[in-house]
Amino acid sequence: MRKALYIFGLLNDADMELLAALGRVRTVPAGAVLIAQSQQLDRLYVLLDGHMEVAVSGIGTVATLGSGEILGEMSFVDSSPTSATVQALDDVRLLDLPRSALEARFAADPGFGMRFFRAVAVFLAERMRNTTARLGYGKDEPMPAGMLEDELDDGLLDNVGIAGERFARLVRLLAER
């Protein structure tokens, strides 16, 4: 749910309603591949219920994702082919957000586009910091005073409760359709 905390914490309530209106709920059965590594992806997904496995060719499973995770964000940002395969571990429900619908909305509402891309950028920056730390880069540089290695940013912590409520609201809005 960590991705959702970054993204939903930086969006506003109206943005959540907009995401619900732009996307469609989709069910993926257990064992089905949602995203194949190296494919072109023209959408973004929000995992509403269930679990998915992320695997990279030659490496194996790199993550298991649950409710609230965002899928396809890297390919959404740079339009590159996907870097991993994502497969349903059980029956999952997700919000399918087509790139064309989101891009049309970004053009009509630049404020929404700014908030959306800032949220994705903050998440990707944090992921990069954690990855480089795990690989041993920057070991000679001290952590900021009072900060633990995998601690969330203070600005994000302020929005954790709000982000969780926004995700719950998104799920409720989608259930009403």
Image (cartoon, grey):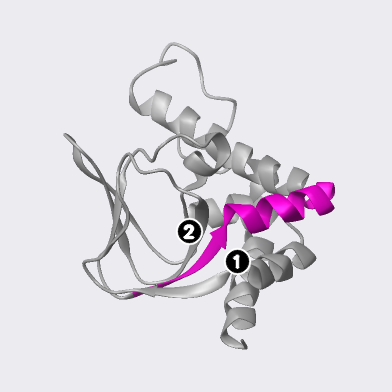
Q: Is 98 a magenta residue?
A: yes
Dominant secondary-structure state across the stretch colored magenta: helix
| In-front residue for pair 8/76 | 76
Q: Residue furthest bottom?
A: 176
Q: Quadrant of the C terminus?
A: bottom right
Q: Is residue 58 above or below residue 92?
A: above
Q: Is residue 114 visible?
A: yes
Q: Is residue 158 visible?
A: no
Per the image, the residue denoted by label 2 is 1
Residue drawn where x is 24% and y is 72% of the image: 30
| In-front residue for pair 62/157 | 62
Q: Secondary structure at mark 1?
A: helix
Per the image, the residue denoted by label 1 is 164
The number of callouts visible is 2
What type is the residue that disc 2 sits on?
Met
| In-front residue for pair 48/96 | 96
Q: Does residue 110 appear to the left or right of 137 in the view shown?
A: right
- Mark 2 or mark 1: whose residue is earlier in sequence: 2
Q: Secondary structure at mark 2?
A: loop
Q: Is 173 a magenta residue?
A: no
> Can you give x and y, in whole percent of width and height, for residue 10 in the image?
71, 51
Residue drawn where x is 51% and y is 65% of the image: 96
What type is the residue that disc 1 sits on?
Gly
Residue drawn where x is 66% and y is 65% of the image: 19
Q: Are marks 2 and 1 in contact (CB under 8 Å)?
A: yes
